[in-house]
Each structure stands twice: as structure tokens, then as C-alpha cells.
Image (cartoon, rainbow, N blue to C red):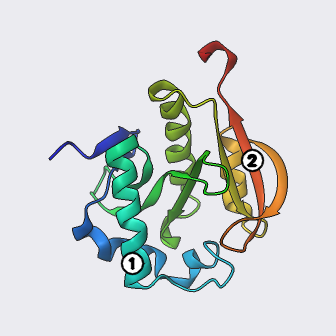
């Protein structure tokens, strides 16, 4: 088995998933606090929905070193959430996203993870840009996108039915 660690930050280890970690994803996305911003119905994820998502993330990690990654806090090894890149279905663009357990909100973990991912994608891939979006009601998530330098582009309904503010981050000119 290859090393599943993709990135480390000052406080986090970011790694790929294994199917035996499904219960962690169900715990995270199975809460109303997290699920309300994942789809228009706001329903917590079932085991089946989580299993399908996890299988896709594992495949994306194995084939492209993308996918949503596990966030583990270095100080105590706690699983605190996930962050990473998906592929936005309508356009095929890399799309950054993150979700943390509610007790870890407001501590800078999402911004730390997103900033590391922003730097990683341009260092390790030939991507010209990536997008990100968040429910228009999710002010903390929108703030993370702005904090890492993303530029708002438009408001639209994403495939899950949420009205979202979309953002883009272009590869810096010095990296071209």
C-alpha cells in the first residue's frame, strides 16, 4: 500500500481514505450541522451515500492524487474533518471543499487546510485554476474561500440544489 499522506501543515496531517474508515465519514456527514450545507435537502448522509462518496474519493486519490482528504490533528491524532479537491461534474474543474465537525469550527483548521491545498495543486499538478463554492448562507465557509485568496465569480445553483457563491483561484503568473 502506498503512503496515504498527501500533505502536512503546522497542525494537520491530510491523507487519503480507506474503506474501513467509512464510519468516520458517516459521523462527519451524518450530522445536521454539516449536512445542511452539502445538499438542498440538508439530510445527513446514510451509510450508502457515504460509501459511494468514499469510493469515489479513494479512486480520485489513487488516479489523480485528488479527492477529499482526512484531516487529522497532529497534537492528539483526532479525526476532525475532511478537505480536498473533487471534480466539479458540470465542467470537470478541480473544486476545493472542506467540512469539519462543529466543535472544530472557528479554530482556523479549514483555512489552514485550504491554504495548503491551494499551494499544493499548483506545485504538484498542471491545473491552471480551481474553483470553490459555498452555500450563500454559510458565511464561515465563504470566509475561508476569501481568506485563501479566491475571487467571487457568480451565484448559481450547484448540482446538489444549493444556491451557492462560486469563487475561482487562478494559477499565479509566476507559476506559469
Q: Is residue 59 above or below residue 116?
A: below
**Rendered location of residue 162, percent (x, y):** 73, 72
Which residue bears the numbered disc 1? 26
**Which of 112/134 is in front?**
134
Q: Give coordinates of residue 143: x percent, y percent.
A: 71, 53
Answer whether labels 2 and 1 touch (C-beta < 8 Å): no
Describe residue 151's horizontal placement relative to residue 176 as left or right.
Answer: right
Look at the numbered disc 2 and give the secondary structure of its residue: strand
Residue labelled with disc 2: 167
Percent across and percent down for residue 175 are: 60, 17
**Tag of residue 53:** none
Residue found 72% across the figure and 41% down from its top:
168
Secondary structure at numbered mark 1: helix
Q: Nearer the viewer, residue 166 or 127?
A: 127
Distance between mark 2 and mark 1 Cα atoms? 28 Å
The spot of residue 60 in percent (x, y) is: 40, 51
Q: Quadrant of the C terminus?
A: top right
Pick whichever, 17 or 159, lies toward us: 159
In this view, which residue lies farthest toward the left? 1
Q: Quadrant of residue 129?
A: top right
**Is residue 113 shown above or below 162?**
above
Amino acid at each position: 500500500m502506498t503512503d496515504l499522506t498527501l500533505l502536512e501543515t503546522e497542525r494537520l496531517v491530510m491523507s487519503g481514505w480507506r474503506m474501513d474508515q467509512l464510519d468516520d465519514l458517516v459521523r462527519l456527514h451524518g450530522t445536521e450541522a454539516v449536512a445542511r450545507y452539502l445538499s438542498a435537502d440538508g439530510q445527513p448522509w446514510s451509510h450508502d451515500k457515504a460509501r459511494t462518496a468514499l469510493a469515489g474519493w479513494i479512486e480520485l486519490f489513487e488516479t489523480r492524487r485528488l479527492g477529499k482528504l482526512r484531516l487529522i490533528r497532529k497534537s492528539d491524532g483526532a479525526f476532525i474533518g475532511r478537505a480536498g479537491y473533487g471534480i466539479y461534474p458540470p465542467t470537470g474543474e478541480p473544486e476545493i471543499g472542506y467540512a469539519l465537525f462543529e466543535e472544530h469550527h472557528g479554530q482556523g483548521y479549514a483555512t489552514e487546510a485550504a491554504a495548503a491545498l491551494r499551494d499544493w495543486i499548483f506545485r504538484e499538478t498542471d491545473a491552471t485554476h480551481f474553483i470553490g463554492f459555498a452555500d450563500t448562507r454559510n458565511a464561515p465557509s465563504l470566509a475561508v474561500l476569501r481568506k485563501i485568496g479566491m475571487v467571487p465569480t457568480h451565484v448559481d445553483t450547484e448540482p446538489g440544489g444549493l444556491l451557492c457563491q462560486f469563487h475561482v483561484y487562478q494559477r499565479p503568473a509566476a507559476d506559469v
